Amino acid sequence: MDQRFDVTERFADGAQYIAGRLRQGGSEETHPVVDPATGEQVFGYRLAGAADVDAAVAAAEAAFPEWAGATPGERSDAMHRFAAALTERADDLAHAESLQCGKPIKLSTEFDVPGSIDNTAFFAGAARQLEGKAAAEYSGDHTSYVRREPIGVVGSIAPWNYPLQMAAWKVLPAIAAGNTIVLKPAELTPLTSLMFAQAATEAGLPDGVVNVVSGTGPGAGEHLVSHPGVAMTSFTGSTAVGKRVAALATSTVKRIHLELGGKAPFVVFDDADLEAAAHGAVAGALINTGQDCTAATRAYVQRPLYDAFVAAVADLMASVRLGDPFDPHTDLGPLISHRQRDRVAGFVDRARGYATVVTGGEAPGGDLAKGAYYRPTLITGAPQDSEIVQSEIFGPVLVVLPFDGDDEGIALANDTPYGLAASAWSRDVYRTGRASREIRAGCVWINDHIPIISEMPHGGVRASGFGKDMSAYSFEEYTQVKHVMFDNTAVVRKDWHRTVFGDRQT
């Protein structure tokens, strides 16, 4: 398939996917999909409005009884077919993802797409493992057991940094548990979410189980979160927007799952493998051009290794190849937009007043000038309380600070409002064990940074939100627990009745 495949032809019927078919958005406003590597529009579509959200929720409500009533084996079989359909479309998905996001094609083909297919295969199996607590006679006179039941229609909002993977993370545990879903992808990047939903229908999932509304937050997202037909809201995005989502959702007493911002610390103790840590820092900081809420953004390096670490990271960053996302040798693509590029540049430019830009800190010229590119950037000398250390930048920027004792290193790691991910680097199992216990984050990697797997949960604490994506733990978000209690005595008048009326029977 050509890397610039005709998106307009593929989505000629519209960029809303409701009840198993594409349709035009009801809004009079159109929105462009822009290739961030060139700044050129590759697709334009009519945005979803409130009426589209209503139609999608109605489709999901109509599909819910059949899907929720299917056996676990039936849902599992459908999802295995779903995984196979995605596998057949892997090349299309990778190219669409790189086109709309500017991701290097090697990242799309080796990370985003296979990870999403693996998630689908995992949840196809997990659909058969929705178990409650075993039956027992806890009161002595009754048998109790616990059922896990689907919640209903889930309204999910996904971000633009990993459109395909975030669609998978939102959709898969929800439907594996028997729910139906309306997904709102970011208006910048709807293409692979639509392709994902199409593959679900082509695999035989009933119409209305997976719906997609492509619109803005104010135009579609807020109506989805507030909709009375939506029983649960799942949101991934910034902490600021997450607060707004929470306020809207709680006004209608919905269940909420929030995966919010991050400012991941990368703690290097003085006995760490320096070369491994430097390579890990560059990979962890630059993945997806730094547009990753778990990216390594602030490295704390114990003073004996500090200078050598800074030098090694600077050398590695200088070797990173910026270029056309569809060139298989490109290491770093553009940011999602010129607006985001300028936002990142603003952080770095303000930091020049109080810190040192060791390498990077600029947009490239030449053939890349028309895209939203920004060079890998290393900053030192920033105070712990500075903006560049405390705020989420979402770009290819790493700040390095020294520390002395282990207590200080762990304290600095915990000294932001966030708590999504972190890593600790040491050859000492006791040091890394302590770090894994005391660093406040939903995930702590030891001697690595970034890898995720379908079997393990992802989610944060504090300002990074709550709840889990991936793994069987995600079913805690997408099921409701029901206690069922059977009387075993067949006694008409129970002894406890006397606490309400009458006397004890003799």
Image: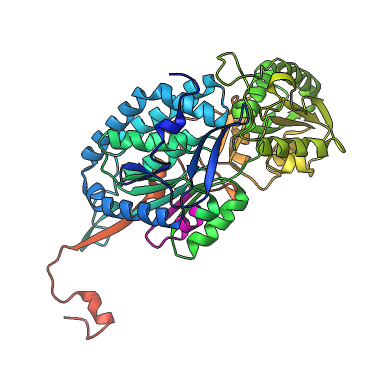
- Check if residue 231 falls in the magenta segment: yes
Residue at horizontal 31 percent and vertical 34 percent from the top: 124
- Looking at the picture, how far across and down is residue 285, in whole percent? 65, 28
45 with respect to 268 (left or right)? left
- Looking at the picture, how far across and down is residue 278, in whole percent? 69, 20
Res. 160 in view: no
89 with respect to 366 (left or right)? left
Q: Which residues are magenta?
A: 220-234
- Looking at the picture, how far across and down is residue 444, in whole percent? 57, 34
- Check if residue 403 falls in the magenta segment: no
Of 170 and 148, the residue lying toward us: 170
Of 369 and 426, the residue lying toward us: 369
Residue at horizontal 26 percent and vertical 62 percent from the top: 139
Res. 335 in view: yes
Q: Quadrant of residue 424?
A: top right
410 with respect to 481 (left or right)? right
- Looking at the picture, how far across and down is residue 485, in whole percent? 23, 61
Q: Quadrant of residue 228?
A: bottom left
Q: Quadrant of the N terminus?
A: top left
Q: Quadrant of the C terminus?
A: bottom left
Above or below: residue 215 compared with residue 228: above
